[in-house]
């Protein structure tokens, strides 16, 4: 990352601006990660897993309808680990699942090397080449190109699209990431209240909200804390010292605490539900679902 907060790649001693988004902001990365959450796909990839989402009979039908194709396309994604693993998978498989042949893109001029790579397509007539002299005017080139296109025989059958493409482009990738983390926490045995607090409060407040068996918690009641600061005009250091002496503890009454716990429970449930719906979709080659 440069001083301008942009990413650069050094090639032959020169910095080149890297286009695109960070890994955690990529729909394709989360497609890959959500597929790994599927217990069906885990079983298909010979992972040691007990099916929880379906019966063996349902698994066999899914394998026939979708699983074998997914495995053939995506491969065993569990052979790759971490961010570097994703890039290895992307170079080996991902770019071909979500991209199209550069010669079909028509968004830039092809190099000689790129043309040679596709000599078979050129020899077969599937691709035509034309030289565009840069010494001519734009109007002259447009007339000549139009004439050449009129002479060509176009089948219209070779329109190329990606093998897989996002089901919904209007999706909050940050939400996909947070919901993924919530699902992992749930799999690790955390309660919904803990998960809701994880995305809403600091660690001390998380622990306070998930602690049961008491009428009052030590959790800060934010409005009361702000009022205390305003009236006394204390510094951060003075507040920390008061905290250590347990003088600045604003008890939250049981009704308010219960309401917040219910809110966090509902929040976590919705996040986990969203993940499960996306797992079901990705098992059929569809991702991501909208809100």
Image: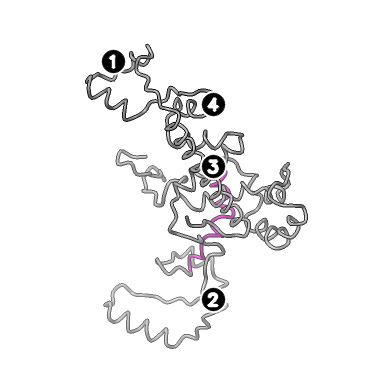
Q: Find residue 195 and name its label.
A: none
Mark 2 — residue? 158
Type of secondary structure dominating the magenta stretch: helix
Tell me which numbered mark, 3 or 1, is placed earlier along the sequence.
Answer: 3
Q: Nearer the viewer, residue 82 or 245?
A: 245
42 drawn magenta: no
Q: Are marks 2 and 3 in contact (CB under 8 Å)?
A: no
Tell me which numbered mark, 2 or 4, is placed earlier along the sequence.
Answer: 2
Mark 4 — residue? 212
Residue count near mark 2 (Cα–Cα under 10 Å), binned few <14, some 14–19, many ≥20:
few
Find the distance from the CA under tag 3 to the CA under tag 1: 46 Å
Tell me which numbered mark, 1 or 2, is placed earlier along the sequence.
Answer: 2
Residue 131, percent from left and from top: 40, 75
Residue 144, percent from left and from top: 35, 83
Find the distance from the CA under tag 4 to the CA under tag 3: 42 Å
Q: Quadrant of residue 48?
A: top right
What secondary structure is marked by label 2?
loop
What secondary structure is marked by label 3?
helix
Residues shaded magenta: 84-103
Tell me which numbered mark, 2 or 3, is placed earlier along the sequence.
Answer: 3
Mark 1 — residue? 238
Q: What residue is at 59 percent from the left and 41 percent from the top?
A: 81
Mark 3 — residue? 84
Find the distance from the CA under tag 1 to the CA under tag 2: 72 Å
What secondary structure is marked by label 1?
helix
């Amino acid at each position: 990352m440069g001083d301008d907060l942009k990413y650069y790649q050094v090639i032959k001693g020169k910095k080149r601006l890297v286009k695109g988004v960070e890994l955690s902001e990529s729909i394709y990365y989360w497609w890959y990660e959500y597929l790994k959450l599927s217990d069906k796909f885990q079983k298909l990839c010979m992972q040691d897993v007990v099916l929880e989402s379906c019966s063996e009979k349902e698994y066999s039908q899914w394998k026939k309808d979708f699983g074998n194709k997914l495995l053939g396309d995506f491969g065993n994604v569990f052979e790759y680990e971490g961010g570097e693993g994703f890039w290895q998978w992307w170079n080996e498989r991902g770019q071909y699942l979500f991209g199209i042949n550069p010669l079909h893109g028509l968004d830039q001029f092809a190099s000689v090397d790129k043309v040679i790579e596709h000599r078979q397509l050129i020899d077969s007539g599937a691709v035509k080449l034309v030289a565009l002299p840069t010494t001519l005017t734009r109007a002259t080139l447009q007339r000549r190109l139009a004439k050449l296109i009129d002479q060509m025989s176009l089948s219209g059958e070779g329109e190329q699209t990606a093998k897989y493409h996002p089901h919904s482009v209007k999706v909050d990738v940050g939400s996909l990431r947070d919901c993924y983390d919530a699902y992992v926490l749930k799999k690790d045995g955390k309660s919904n209240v803990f998960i809701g607090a994880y995305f809403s409060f600091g660690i001390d407040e998380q622990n306070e909200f998930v602690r049961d068996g008491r009428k009052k918690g030590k959790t800060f009641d934010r409005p009361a804390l702000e009022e205390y600061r305003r009236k006394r005009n204390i510094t951060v250091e003075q507040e920390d010292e008061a905290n250590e002496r347990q003088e600045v503890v604003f008890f939250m009454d049981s009704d308010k605490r219960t309401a917040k716990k219910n809110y966090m429970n509902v929040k976590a449930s919705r996040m986990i539900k969203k993940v499960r719906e996306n797992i079901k979709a990705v098992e059929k080659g569809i991702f991501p679902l909208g809100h």
